[in-house]
Amino acid sequence: MITTVRPAWVTSPVRPDQPDAALLLREYMTEMVDRYHRRPALPGEVDAALAELPSDDLTEPDGLLLLAHHDGDLAGCAGLRWRTGWAELTRVFVRPAQRGAGGGAALLAAVEERARAAGADRIRLDTRADLIEARALYARHGYREIPAYTRGPYAEHWFEKQLTSAPERAK
């Protein structure tokens, strides 16, 4: 019998201004700009988008940013912003070379665990209509579409997942 071992996904919190975090956040925003405009980003567009939608609040006490490594390689990130009683998910990104290996699921599990530990009873997020893969990922992992809770030029779909505590999950 042959046993296949999948490479491990490991997540860890990091400040958004750390080099690996800044690199991934730039890659994330580059993909967002490219997909939004349906063309490669023009000079200055990614910098403008990073300035318009900063990630500097993804650190305590306002939030957190998790980096994911896959089999030792820098592979993705996800952030949470703390709200009263709940958390907002943002910046979910897996590098193209690591997609299809469970990174999205690993990142969602990690942020959900962190949110639960911080006392959040749910996670919410907004996303764009063109991010079909992201919307499918959220739906597969128990996020359901809800009415708009934010306004913004890029918010077109809103999702929420109720979190349960560890004892409740065991029932």
Image (cartoon, rainbow, N blue to C red):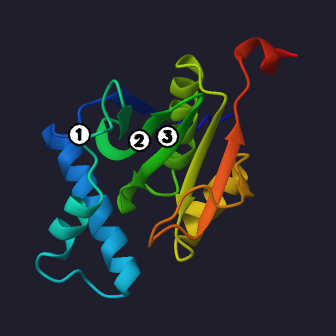
Q: Are marks 2 and 3 in contact (CB under 8 Å)?
A: no
Which x, y percent locates residue 164? 74, 25
C-alpha distance separating marks 1 and 3: 16 Å
- Badge 2: few (under 14), some or many (20 or more) residues near its Cα, within 10 Å? many
- Which residue occupies 46% across, 57% down? 99
**Residue at the right extreme, as displayed:** 171
**Amino acid beneath label 1:** Pro
Left or right of 49 on screen, residue 7: right
- Name the residue beneath numbered marker 2: 79
Q: Quadrant of residue 129?
A: bottom right
Q: Are marks 2 and 1 in contact (CB under 8 Å)?
A: yes
- Name the residue beneath numbered marker 1: 16
Left or right of 136 on screen, residue 73: left
Q: Could you tell me which secondary element the residue under label 3 belongs to? A: helix
- In the image, is residue 170 above or below residue 140? above
**Amino acid beneath label 2:** Gly
- Which residue occupies 36% across, 47% down? 76
- Which residue occupies 39% across, 80% down? 36
- Badge 3: few (under 14), some or many (20 or more) residues near its Cα, within 10 Å? many
C-alpha distance separating marks 2 and 3: 9 Å
Q: Could you tell me which secondary element the residue under label 2 belongs to? A: strand
- Name the residue beneath numbered marker 3: 107
**Amino acid beneath label 3:** Leu
- In the image, is residue 31 above or below residue 164? below
- Badge 1: few (under 14), some or many (20 or more) residues near its Cα, within 10 Å? many
Which x, y percent locates residue 61? 34, 24
Q: Quick one: quadrant of the N terminus?
A: top right
- In this view, the residue in front, 63 or 171, is 63
